[in-house]
Image (cartoon, grey):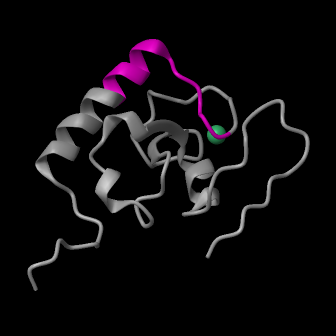
Amino acid sequence: MASRSRARTHTRRFEVERKKFFAQCKKENAVCWLCGMPIDYEAAQNTTDDSYNLDHYYPVSKRPDLQDDPAGFRPSHTSCNNLRGNKDPELPLGTLSRQWILIP
Ligand SMILES: [Zn+2]
């Protein structure tokens, strides 16, 4: 198989970029991009509902080629990211109507 793997892989670049991104979010106290609420940066990642979790604007399952691209990184709550799964996100704060997006 000469084609690139489509499976989720953790490259060295991703590890470097996600650490940088976390440090930046923590410094700026960035809110969850899915719900707009503050994130508990003191909790270890992925341990509590309010803890930080790295989300991708484009789900990795759909765009594995963008996994390493920091431009697609978003800070989220562990619980919000879990709820989102690989669906397109509902718009955060200020959107009253729920957005349903067709997933092929
Ligand atoms: Zn959230």
Q: Is residue 71 left or right of residue 94?
A: left
Which stretch appears magenta? 22-34
The front one of 12 and 45 is 12
Quarter of the image with the C terminus is: bottom right
Image point (84%, 37%), residue name = 95
Residue at the outermost bottom position: 1
Q: Is residue 2 left or right of residue 28?
A: left
* 7 vs 81, nearest the viewer: 7
> Where's ligand 1: which quadrant?
top right
Residue extending furthest toward the right: 96
The x and y percentages for residue 6 are 28, 72
Q: Residue at x 44, y 27 (%)?
A: 42
Spot the residue most to the left: 2
User: Residue 23, image x and y in percent?
Assistant: 32, 23
> Does the magenta-highlighted stretch encompass residue 24?
yes
86 magenta-colored: no
In the image, is residue 27 above or below residue 51? Answer: above
**Side of 80 where 93 appears, left or right:** right
Q: Where is residue 61, by image quadrant?
A: bottom left
Residue 1's x, y, as percent?
10, 86
Q: Quadrant of residue 88?
A: bottom right
Q: Position of residue 70 (x, y in %)?
A: 33, 36
Measured along the vertical axis of the image, is residue 97 above or below residue 5? Answer: above
**Residue visible at 91% across and 40% down?**
96
